[in-house]
Image (cartoon, helix red, strand yellow):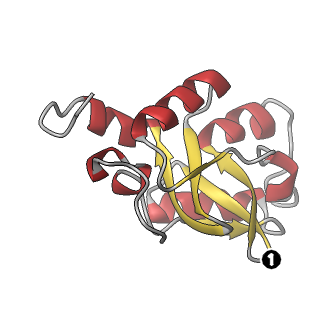
């Protein structure tokens, strides 16, 4: 990763993101994705087209896009239910900027990039950890 942008390194997204990111190819089935999320104990997967992140699939997508629409998880693909466009943030942006962006877009996950490279994911869970620990806040 490049040099830190913030004066206080604690406030950078890279300090609170989850890495490595759990990913899945867009060609996998919804059932594959659900099983993989269960095995990895995660609530989301970044969807890849080749090596490029192109979307995200979350537990919410299973309820709203699979069950509610009656899709067959054995045949429908992750690409059929992934959320796009993918919302990203630079790894050197502040945690406060991540929080603002997530609130503005009404999303629970942001994919963290360092230029064109996928380096992590920041979720509401990560932000709760940051905001609930007064010893690490500087705002």
Which quadrant, please, contains the C terminus?
Answer: top left
Q: Secondary structure at mark 1?
A: loop
The quadrant where residue 115 appears: bottom right
Q: Residue at x 58, y 31 (%)?
A: 101
Q: Residue at x 65, y 59 (%)?
A: 46
User: Mark 1, residues whose alpha carbon is within 10 Å: few (<14), some, or many (≥20)?
Assistant: few
In front of the other: 3 or 44:
3
In front of the other: 22 or 99:
99
Residue 109: where, in percent of width, then height?
A: 56, 42
Left or right, 131 with respect to 133, comes to right
Q: Which residue is mark 1?
A: 50
Residue 132: where, in percent of width, then height?
A: 23, 29
Q: Residue at x 48, y 69 (%)?
A: 2
Left or right, 49 with respect to 132, comes to right
Compared with 52, 5 (above or below) is above
Q: How many marks?
A: 1
Q: Residue furthest bottom?
A: 50
Q: Residue furthest left?
A: 135
In front of the other: 75 or 4:
4
Residue 95: where, in percent of width, then height?
A: 41, 39
Residue 45: where, in percent of width, then height?
A: 61, 57
In front of the other: 42 or 9:
9
Left or right, 24 with respect to 123, comes to right
Q: Residue at x 50, y 56 (%)?
A: 91
Left or right, 83 with respect to 106, comes to right
């Amino acid at each position: 990763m490049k040099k830190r942008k913030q004066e206080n390194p604690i406030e950078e997204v890279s300090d609170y993101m989850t890495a490595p990111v759990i990913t899945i190819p867009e060609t996998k089935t919804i059932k594959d994705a659900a099983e993989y999320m269960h095995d990895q104990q995660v609530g989301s997967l970044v969807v890849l087209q080749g090596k490029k992140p192109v979307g995200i699939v979350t537990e919410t997508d299973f309820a709203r896009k699979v069950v509610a629409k009656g899709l067959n998880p054995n045949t429908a693909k992750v690409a059929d239910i992934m959320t796009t466009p993918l919302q990203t943030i630079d790894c050197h942006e502040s945690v406060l900027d991540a929080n603002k962006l997530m609130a503005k877009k009404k999303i629970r996950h942001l994919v963290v990039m360092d230029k064109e490279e996928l380096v992590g994911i920041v979720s509401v869970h990560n932000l709760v950890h940051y905001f609930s620990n007064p010893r690490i806040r500087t705002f």
